[in-house]
Image (cartoon, helix red, strand yellow):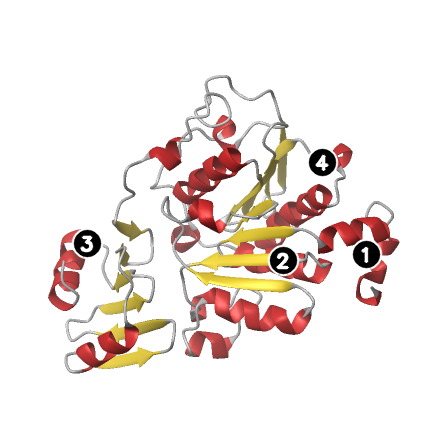
Amino acid sequence: MERYSRQMLFQPIGEAGQKKLQQRAVCIIGMGALGTVLANHMVRAGVGFVRMVDRDYVEQSNLQRQMLYDEDDASQSLPKVVAAERKLGKINSSVQLESIVADVSIHNVEALLDGIDLVLDGTDNFQTRYLLNDACWKQGIAFAYGGAVSSRGMSAMFIPGKTPCLRCFIQSADSAGQTCDTVGVIAPVVDMVASYQAVEALKYLVDAAEQQRRSVVTFDIWHNHYYEMKFNKPRLNCPCCGTKQYPALQEQEQDMIITLCGRETVQFTSHASHDLSMWKERLEGVASAVRFNPYLLKVELPEGERLVLFADGRVLVQGTEDLGRAKTIYARYIGM
């Protein structure tokens, strides 16, 4: 326990709280800027089991704020969860780590949360956050929400049966809103948001219910603004915590083709997995360059666009946001 000696000297945690942390399981959805800070805090604090889920791979533009990654990870196009597990395993080998390369959807979200005490939000879009919110409420799992863009941040801890849910505060989200890929983000705001999430997570995991913050915090660290919205009772007509309809889990199908805002990328999702070795052989003859690792295949096309194939069945068409053009490229090389 010497590793945690300074943390245990903090009386609200102490030795009893440390033992509780070692028996807890958390799931971090999204291993970008927020997720890397969250994972670092959870692993160093000694949380017993940390599951990390992300669909993306490391790129140069991530290194400014995604603290677990380095230039070698970007040059190898390693999946973020794989790179994160390698770093975190060297930081604390006593924590059980699980890395899952996957796009969270209605088809896998409940399985991903199985056996989990707390979900930490490292995502960058409200479609996924609503999905997590509804799945957490259905399964009775606490949800530590966080968001960061530009110099602004927001955080709240939602606990089924004790607080309202995310939908009570943000009932709908405009998909054309600002994102880190369109207006940028500075690293300090990411650290602050994730730290707000992490400290509420620690309170929850050591059963410090009386100290749990019951509010949504928003701030702008560049313009020196801070605002706190106290929790009210859950909305009686909330489709999640009120009527328990869980709309994000009842949709028949999520869009199988989506534009990733600000990234000149269109994502195609298939329920069938990809044999990357087979696709490497198939595309080498028509591509100007092919890069391959056990997790993904990157292909430079003669037309100028790029394909990224993942083993879980996803394909990114990069270099365009035009759905028609992306479908043409996909059909030409993958098949509709």
Which residue was labeled with disc 3? 322
Q: Residues within 10 Å of mark 3 (few under 14, many from 20)?
A: few
Mark 2 residue type: Phe
Mark 4 residue type: Gln
First in sequence: mark 3 vs mark 1: 1
First in sequence: mark 4 vs mark 2: 2
Residue 213: image location, x then y, percent: 69, 35
Is label 4 in a helix, a strand or a loop? Answer: loop
Q: What is the quadrant of the C terminus in the image?
A: bottom left
Nearer to the camera, 84 or 23: 23
| Residue 133: numbered disc | none
Q: CA distance from mark 4 to mark 3?
A: 45 Å
Q: CA distance from mark 3 to mark 1?
A: 51 Å
| Residue 7: numbered disc | 1
Mark 1 residue type: Gln
- The answer to whether any part of residue 215 appears in the image is yes
Residue appearing at x 46%, y 25% in the figure: 244
Q: CA distance from mark 1 to mark 2?
A: 18 Å
| Residue 212: numbered disc | 4
Q: CA distance from mark 4 to mark 1?
A: 18 Å
Q: CA distance from mark 3 to mark 2?
A: 41 Å
Is label 1 in a helix, a strand or a loop? Answer: helix
Q: Residues within 10 Å of mark 4 (few under 14, many from 20)?
A: some
Residue 234: image location, x then y, percent: 55, 22
Of badges 1 and 2, the one in the foreground is 2
Whether residue 276 is situated above or below residue 209 in the rendered picture: below
Which residue was labeled with disc 2? 49
Residue appearing at x 15%, y 68% in the figure: 333
Q: CA distance from mark 4 to mark 2?
A: 22 Å
Of badges 4 and 3, the one in the foreground is 4
Residue appearing at x 27%, y 55% in the figure: 271
First in sequence: mark 4 vs mark 1: 1
